[in-house]
Image: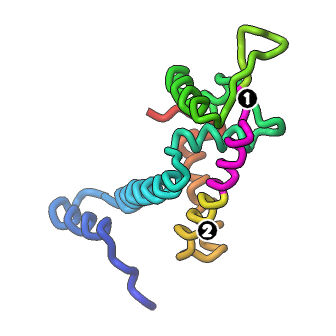
Amino acid sequence: MLAPMSDHVDHVLAQWAEQCPELDSSSMAVMGRIKRLARIVEAEQRVVFGAHDLDPAAFDVLATLRRSPAPHRLTPAELMRSAMVTSGAITQRLDRLEERDLVVRTRRAEDGRSVHVSLTQAGRELIDRALVDHVANQNRLLSGLTEEERTHVADDLRGLLESLGDNGRQVRLG
């Protein structure tokens, strides 16, 4: 049987074992790797989004609209809940996307005080291109895992999230 490869987290754990042998630092093996993985994934996503002149926030709004049922429109409040940001933050995102002609805000017929946000043709074309590259990037990042390993990791992470009270609804972090 091959010995597991060693990484930075193993090095940190070895240091803690030497300095504080009575400390159970096994949780650091999981949390340290989750944190490092998140940094790597976020950096790789920024490269892909940047190739489409998007940032993660803009991609999030466009993708949320795109995955919504046709005609791909939501209220700012619905977008705010999906993005887990404040109303001011969603307004800023929508302003920037509207300036670029990627979304349009229209008054709702049933209530003229509120608006719907919809993708423009340019917005739909952009998110469709960016989405293909985004998924290809995710597949590239996971290429070191077999399909079975991906399933196990996804199931294990779902179990961890559920154990922390994440029931599948959007939760505000921080």
Q: Is residue 129 magenta?
A: yes
For the stretch drawn in magenta, the main secondary structure is: helix
Residue 84 in sight in this render? no
Q: Secondary structure at mark 1?
A: strand
The residue sitting at 47% across, 53% down in the picture is 46
125 with respect to 145 (left or right): right
Look at the image and tell me in which quarter the C terminus lies.
top left
Mark 1 neighbour density, 10 Å: few (under 14) some (14–19) many (20 or more):
some
Residue type at numbered disc 2: Arg
Q: Which mark is residue 58?
A: none
Residue type at numbered disc 1: Leu
Mark 1 and mark 2 in contact? Answer it, CB < 8 Å. Answer: no
Q: CA distance from mark 1 to mark 2?
A: 32 Å
Q: Which residue is mark 1?
A: 74
The residue sitting at 51% across, 26% down in the picture is 92
Residue 142 in sight in this render? yes
Q: Nearer the viewer, residue 70 or 151?
A: 70
8 above or below 57? below
Depth check, mark 1 against mark 2: the one in front is: 1
The residue sitting at 31% across, 58% down in the picture is 25
Which sits earlier in the primary sequence, circle 1 or circle 2?
1
Look at the image and tell me in which quarter the N terminus lies.
bottom left
Q: Which mark is residue 150?
A: 2
What's the magenta region? 117-131
Give coordinates of residue 2: x percent, y percent: 42, 89
Mark 2 neighbour density, 10 Å: few (under 14) some (14–19) many (20 or more):
some
Asked where in the image residue 108 lies, by quadrant, the reply is: top right
Give coordinates of residue 41: x percent, y percent: 47, 58
123 above or below 9? above
Q: What count of labels does the image hold? A: 2
